[in-house]
Image (cartoon, rainbow, N blue to C red):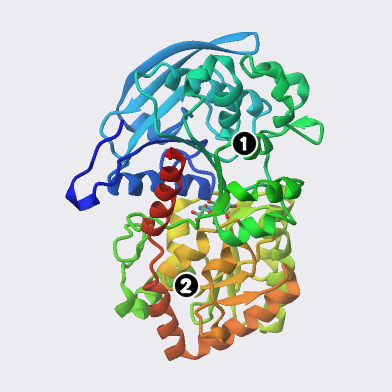
Amino acid sequence: MKYFTGVFKFFAISMEIIHISAECYPVAKAGGLGDVVGALPKYQNKSGHVAKVVMPMYRTKFLYENQWQVDHKGTTSLGSWMFDYTIIKEKTNKLGFDLYLVDINGLLDRDRIYGYHDDTERFMAFQIAVLHWINQWDHKPDVLHCHDHHTSMIPFMVKYCYAFNRLGNVPTVLTIHNAQYQGWMGWDKSHYIPAWDTWKGGLLDWKNTINPLAAGIKTAWKVTTVSSSYLEEMKWSANGLESLISQEQFKSMGILNGIDTEVWNPETDRYLREQYDPEIVRRGKDINKKFLCKEFHLDESNPLVVFIGRLVGEKAADILPDAILSSLYSMQGNVNFLVLGNGEPEIENQLVQLKNTFAGNYNAFIGYDETLSHLMYAGADFLLMPSRVEPCGLNQMYAMKYGTVPMVRSTGGLKDTVVDVGDNGWGIRFEQPTAGDVTYSVGRAVQVYQEKEKMESMQQHMMNIDHSWQHSVDQYINLYQDLKH
Ligand code: ADP
Ligand code: GLC
């Protein structure tokens, strides 16, 4: 479906883009993938395109609190298992785009997004159902935009599964948000894929196993990563896919994520104790900090460093206990830490135990709490991200928008968005994901904190940086349009 969108778009051709994803905020979110898929389509629509999202129907609060209509019912199969699926559509366009959920009874309708023994079957069945549905539309969409390994079999399936031949010339784009997870499945599960051209088996294989992310990289028309630095880094560190990334570089590009300023904006954020703009940043942050410190029994006169994120090796969360301990000793208690996160049980336990040793200077909330995260971006002075791998990172951009100084390891998207204060920037950068580098950086942070005027002008500067989605939307649209020619 194509039409001219009028004088204001200078006769740009409107495109129909179908985003296929495992997450989408506020329907279901485990991390930044959800934030991106909840925002990018909305801003693509605002730019005059027709972007839609298709995702699994999990049992979430959003499902029960909204109105749905049945769009389609179908029957297809995963290997020899025939299953029924239902596509439901949110009735009111609440999120700024058409949202479709795929209901597969007993398989997708669970409380969590990931972490089940049959995740392979769940996401394979989801992808098959999506294509089975789109295949019988009267028209063809302009682009199928897949996100991460949960949907990265789609580029292969539209090209080589006989049942989906009709979609064979629909361009596919795969965005890699995180190459650490690749969805590996043994060759014994190859019968899950609807009848396909077995001569093309090599396209599914990577190191003797079916690797859905690798298959997507090989067969998508274009591959994007969520920052340019990440694309470069993947050539030497991509959890086994390094040579493939180099090989497919000709069709790959980095497009930095934006942030959704309708959700992340201290001037309008309803989760805050006090809303604020750059002019009153000091007062606004003080009120939020006071509230946080009271809740978590911290001394509000100290600089407050926070960590928000998944407690996993990728985020270097394992170094947090040592880094916090060594920073508190070296600063003689003149700094506070607050951690919000969940993940690996061992890291969670260590972070909980630390509470007894450093009450008053340190606290942690182990769990997932959207409201608390907003309050922390607003009330903190510094946000620590020692990540080993960070394809883009949204936290540092949220922090900047809320006037919180990012303290980041120089990697991936962190490198592309944060400039060190020593280079006339507004952040603190370090090289290694180690307790030593973090401790040194905390020392630098405390110094910056003491120079109140400088701190305020850095805060105002970073709050005014434009991280909106518009630039990325334009890049994606150009990329799709290239594929139509
Ligand atoms: P990733 O997707 O790798 O986890 P990002 O920086 O892209 O990292 O995005 C993380 C997103 O998840 C942010 O919106 C962050 O605020 C949120 N988040 C992570 N952990 C938690 C948590 N425990 N509670 C609330 N929000 C969280
Ligand atoms: C992934 C990455 C993160 C990125 C997010 C959204 O989860 O780990 O760096 O910001 O996807 O693209």
Q: Position of residue 420 (x, y in %)?
A: 56, 79
Mark pair 2, 1: CA separation: 37 Å
Name, please, the residue furthest toward the right: 208
> Visible in this render: residue 473?
yes
Identify the residue at horizontal 63%, vertical 79% (top origin). 442
Q: Position of residue 98 (x, y in %)?
A: 33, 34
Residue that label 1 marks: 216
> Label 2 sits on what residue type?
Thr
- Circles 2 and 1, Cβ within 8 Å, touching? The answer is no
Q: Residue at x 47, y 39 (%)?
A: 28
Q: Amino acid at mark 1?
A: Gly
Residue corresponding to mark 2? 404
Q: Quadrant of the C terminus?
A: top left
- Asked if residue 291 can be seen in this view, the reply is no
- The numbered mark at residue 265 is none
In this picture, residue 254 sits left or right of residue 259: right
User: Which badge, 2 or 1, comes first in the chain's sequence?
Assistant: 1
Q: Is residue 250 above or below residue 109?
A: below
Which residue reaches farthest front?
485
Horizontal relation, residue 447 to residue 138: left or right: right
Q: Nearer the viewer, residue 367 or 242?
A: 242
Task: Name the side, left or right, on which 15 lies relative to 411.
Answer: left
